[in-house]
Image (tube, helix red, strand yellow):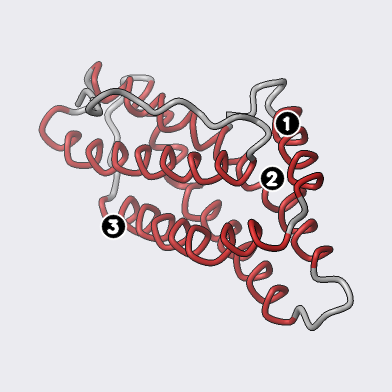
């Protein structure tokens, strides 16, 4: 179940490019979702073997830290900056987009909750069931969410948010991670 990518991972964007950081994070989320799907296929035949344990620990660690930080980056910094950039104009569609994305964040957290326990059991080497339907619901919801952010949110943010505000967002992202914005 080893994961390899031709040429290895691309270098992370700099902290002063928070929109590129968010987009790069989308790629990492997609890779973790792919690992989760492979894990669901692996378990019935191999159980919670060493490969499954490593994969489960990695997926759990990612969705318990980096994915949470990613949602915080958006909800605490990017969304407010985007709304502020539209101050004084009709921002109804923007508010609807932000509210929809925040609702998706909550739904993703709800979909992750039952998977979290399974990842813990697998990582500990204990036999467990990882329902494919739950994995698919989670990974499909994340794929749709990422697509929406890539197609709507990030291009809008790039057009509307001033460079100095983007730098502040980048610094907030870096601080949230203890100095590492990637």
Residue at 28% x, 41% y: name it: 129
Q: Quadrant of the N terminus?
A: top left
Which circle, 3 or 2, is nearer the viewer?
2
Residue 51 falls in which quadrant of the image?
top left
Question: Disc 2 vs disc 1: Cβ atoms closer than 8 Å?
Answer: yes
Residue 58 located left or right of residue 81: left
Q: Is residue 124 above or below residue 87?
A: above
Q: Nearer the viewer, residue 163 or 97?
A: 163
| Nearer-N-terminus badge (1/3) | 3
Q: Residue furthest left?
A: 45
- Give the residue at mark 3: 133
- Give the residue at mark 1: 176
Tell me residue 92's x, y (percent).
Answer: 73, 82
Say the numbered circle drawn on residue 75: none
Residue at 48% x, 64% y: name it: 151
| Nearer-N-terminus badge (2/1) | 2
Residue 53 falls in which quadrant of the image?
top left
Question: Disc 3 vs disc 2: Cβ atoms closer than 8 Å?
Answer: no
Tell me residue 176's x, y (percent).
Answer: 73, 31
Q: Dot 3: few (<14), some (14–19), or many (≥20) neighbours within 10 Å?
A: few
Residue at 54% x, 60% y: name it: 107
Q: How far apart are labels 3 and 2 at the CA level?
A: 27 Å
Element under label 1?
helix
Q: Quadrant of the C terminus?
A: top right
Residue 156 located left or right of residue 36: right
What number of labels is visible? Answer: 3
Q: Nearer the viewer, residue 10 or 135?
A: 10
Q: Residue furthest top?
A: 50
Residue 7 located left or right of residue 116: left
| Nearer-N-terminus badge (3/2) | 2
């Amino acid at each position: 179940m080893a994961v390899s990518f031709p040429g290895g991972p691309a270098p992370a964007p700099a902290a002063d490019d928070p929109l590129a950081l968010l987009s790069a994070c989308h790629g990492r989320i997609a890779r973790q979702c792919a690992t989760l799907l492979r894990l669901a296929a692996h378990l019935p035949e191999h159980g919670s073997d060493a490969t499954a344990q490593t994969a489960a620990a990695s997926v759990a660690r990612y969705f318990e830290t980096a994915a949470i930080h990613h949602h915080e980056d958006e909800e605490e910094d990017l969304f407010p900056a985007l709304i502020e950039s539209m101050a004084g104009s009709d921002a109804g569609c923007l508010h609807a987009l932000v509210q929809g994305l925040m609702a998706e964040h909550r739904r993703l957290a709800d979909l992750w909750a039952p998977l979290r326990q399974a990842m813990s059991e697998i990582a500990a080497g204990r036999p467990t069931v990882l329902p494919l339907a739950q994995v698919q619901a989670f990974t499909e919801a994340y794929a749709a969410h990422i697509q929406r952010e890539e197609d709507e949110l990030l291009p809008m943010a790039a057009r509307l948010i001033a460079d100095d505000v983007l730098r502040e967002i980048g610094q907030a992202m870096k601080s949230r991670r203890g100095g590492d914005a990637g």
